[in-house]
Amino acid sequence: MAVTFLGVRHHSPACARLVADTIRSVRPAYVLVEGPADMNHRMDELLLGHELPIAVYSGYRDPERRHGSWTPLCDYSPEWTALTAGRDVGAELRFIDLPAWHPALAEVRNRYADAEARYNEVTGRLCRAFSVDNVDALWDHLFEIEPADGLAERLAAYFDLVRGDTRTGSDDMAREAYMAQWIRAAAADAGDGPVVVVTGGFHRPALMRLAEQGDRSWPEVPQPPVDAVAASYLVPYSFRRLDALDGYQSGMPSPGYYQHLWESGPADAARRLTEAVTARLRERRQPVSTADLIAARATADGLALMRGHPLPARVDVLDGLAGALVDEAIEVPLPWATRGSLRAGTHPVIVEMIAALSGDRVGRLHHSTPLPPLVHAVLPVVGGPGEERLDLGEEAGRERSRLLHRLRVLRIPGVVRTSGPRLMDGAELVERWTLTESDDRLPALIEAGGYGVDPQEAAAAALAERIPGAGLDQLADVLFDTALCGLGELTGQVLDDLARAVGAATDLGSLGRTLTVALAMWRHDDLFRTSGSTTLGMVVATATRRALWLAEDVRGGPAPADLHRIGAVVAVRDALRHAGPSLGLDTQAALGVADRIAVRQDAPPDLRGASLGLGWSLRGTAAADPARAVRGAFVPASAGDWLAGLFALAREEVLHTGGMLELLDELVGELTDHDFLVALPALRQAFGFFPPRERHLIATRLVERRAGGASAWDLTRLDAAPELVAAGRALDERVDAALRREGLITP
């Protein structure tokens, strides 16, 4: 067989040149490339004349699994130069790897991701031998900066050493066996004609061995199961998504730099890298002087010489720039000395340097590129940039809202809701959205096309994917999203799961949140079109009873108010008030629970206050003397937490009961400065349950009681933060105490 095996590193300019030069020299009958074999019949589509980077996005969905993966291609991808050079010399082009949906690639998100984790031991030894920090610097040192003479031999030696005796898993074995059959078939069909095989270097040694003997018939392209949906589409890609330093494990970091390296060589790439960093920093008003650039260039040249590089490599230039532009101590390792996304604490100048190396190139598909039906269904109706106000009381507003919510659920960029119905307030009938242009919108729509052919079907599939294994909080979110999207069929499935989860719930806060959602949907039929559901009513009733049962079992001493727990009691009150008679809820039994908790000293203060408020708000009168209850609960360490529960449930009752505000004013006024500072954070949280109008009413009454004709606005509009005022008072008290202790002032 006249087969030339080229093992490459994905997205390597040096490998891309070698592949193109070899194909033009050999002029093979076949060019075989590691890539999804189910795209072979669409090779003309792939080579239409797109602006790279692009990717083949493959989506798969069956009743048990959903998977999405990318095969990214840029100008300097060896796979891309293999296809374009092969087309130029008239070769037959074939992808020879398994389709992306195949179980052998079930864990693969990016087909051209680095596999160095499988041979860390070897690359680690090489990095130590050549005194470099990581595999990226090692690769540049061995291949990208060195002259092209002997490159094929050096690559072969490198990948032979890297593969070594590595034991591969069953997934790699399946892929390599499949690719080897393509190679044998192509070689047999070519006769005496040459064949060029371009694959990741890790696979090259095994493929050379496997291609020597075996079945020489053309392999079948695997088909997805009959109950599965699998499709592949071209998507615009970006350097940002391709950058390993941005957290995406592609073959190479800093794609902007390697684009320059591909186009004009290492010397010009180093110059352009420095220019890009300088321009980016100056745009952000970071001073970069000519002297800084001279120092950076001198340092980079010196490092290149010391490291044995004929020209400055990427790390030489970066180290030179970092030394010249960063004066402070660097607390975390430099990003190019490691792999993966940037770490917290990375110096801002370093962050901007990495962004400059990444580049901002975004691919563009040729106008003739086939797109999934979802794209055609959405783009004409999504609308241009701007603000939208939707009246949910009108059918047109509701229909528009459902479309936008479906796009939101599908994570389509540039579609953001700024206000509207929330979990805690489903009755709001005005919704506002902000629509913006985004380069990522088309790729996101193409990728979402794997969920369905239109926004309704796609959103339903995306939401259904969130159900398995979801907890109560997550199911509540899914339930609310299905209602906002107008997906009644899915709501039934979520309700069944929700009803089962509610019956076994152990967390009062999560249960309360779920009850809030279910009740809002049960009540507001004009908005959600979900009332009358037997299952939904069962969720409300079961959650109400379960919440009361859980609340009576809660124990705990003084602790910060748990707003989720308080919210659960609010949800119980609303359920009893708005759904009690219809769903057969026993309000008297609930009041009995509330009365018992309100006087139980081993219950948390916030829950005791909320329970008193629950009974007060439902009856219209407190079960016991509220003034006495307030006095009994007014302990500095927990008074605010108790009041938070009370105000959340019986805000209006407290406000309009004679003498209550005066009593609270008296109790606060009796606190020592120290006790007031202890109680202040929780008191602020408690009074935060009053809306602005009611806070103004409280301030008016307090001013009338204490200051006569002063303005309530002055009391509610401090020039300084309350915490600062309190801290000032504490400081004054300490100063006075010190002066008295030293006899400088008299008591």
Image: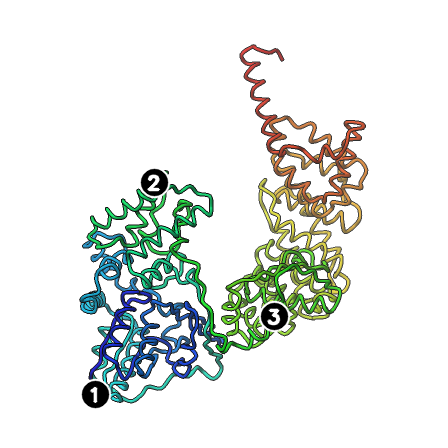
| Residue 582 vertical placement versus 590 (above, below) | below
Query: In 3D space, how far apart are the residues under numbered discs 2 and 3 (Cα atoms)?
Result: 69 Å
* Residue 496's disc number: 3
Judge by depth and name the residue closer to the eye, 472 or 111.
111
Residue 179 on image: x %, y %: 30, 79
In the rendered image, which quarter contains the N terminus? bottom left
Judge by depth and name the residue closer to the eye, 255 or 531.
255
Q: Mark 2 points at which residue?
A: 291
Q: Tell me what residue is drawn at x 64 percent, y 46 percent.
A: 607
Residue 656 on image: x %, y %: 80, 42
Q: Look at label 2 and name its amino acid.
A: Ala
Q: Name the residue under label 1.
A: 192
Q: Look at label 3 and name its amino acid.
A: Asp
Horizontal arrangement in the rendering, residue 316 relative to residue 667 (left or right): left
In the rendered image, which quarter contains the C terminus? top right
Q: Look at label 1 and name its amino acid.
A: Asp
